[in-house]
Amino acid sequence: MIDRVLALFNQSINAVVNWFAQIMDSTGGGRLYIAMMSVVLSVGILLTPLLGAARSGLSDVVRRSRGSKED
């Protein structure tokens, strides 16, 4: 049963990748898409240390309410 689910999942991923590749090849936007994604990812990687958790919203800090005084 799990083999059938994994095969279906694999087939759906392949179908989406092939569909996307056909669209990019027919419009000629493949290189532009790769260039734009490279710029976005490189800027994101470079700015993440500067902006920290404020950008991602994934802070590990646990905040307690000010009125609570538990030990």
Image (tube, rainbow, N blue to C red):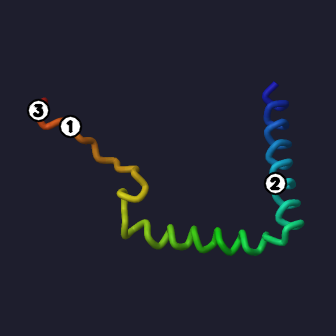
Q: Which badge, 2 or 1, is on the more N-terminal residue?
A: 2
Looking at the image, which residue is at 79% across and 70% down?
29
Which residue has dot 1 on it? Answer: 64
Instruction: State the CA–CA distance, disc 2 to disc 3.
Output: 53 Å
Instruction: State the CA–CA distance, disc 3 to disc 1.
Output: 8 Å
| Relative horizontal placement of residue 5, taking residue 45 as reference (left or right) | right
Please determine whether, in this image, residue 12 is positioned above or below residue 30. Answer: above
Give the image location of residue 37, x and y in percent: 64, 68
In the rendered image, the residue lying farthest to the top is: 1
Q: Identify the secondary structure beneath mark 1.
A: loop
For badge 3, the amino acid type reads Gly
Give the image location of residue 20, x and y in percent: 81, 57
Q: Identify the secondary structure beneath mark 2.
A: helix
| Relative horizontal placement of residue 15, taking residue 69 as reference (left or right) | right
Which residue has dot 3 on it? Answer: 67
Image quadrant where residue 28 sits: bottom right
Give the image location of residue 60, x and y in percent: 34, 47
Q: The N terminus is located in which quarter?
A: top right
Q: Which mark is residue 7?
A: none
In the rendered image, the residue lying farthest to the front is: 27
Q: Identify the secondary structure beneath mark 3.
A: loop
Asked whether the viewer can see residue 71, the reply is: no
Looking at the image, which residue is at 37% across and 70% down?
50
Which residue has dot 2 on it? Answer: 17
Image quadrant where residue 70 sits: top left
For badge 1, the amino acid type reads Arg
Looking at the image, which residue is at 40% across and 50% down?
58
Q: Alpha-carbon neighbours of circle 1 within 10 Å: few (<14), some, or many (≥20)? A: few
Looking at the image, which residue is at 80% across and 31% down?
5
Q: The C terminus is located in which quarter?
A: top left
Image quadrant where residue 42 sits: bottom right
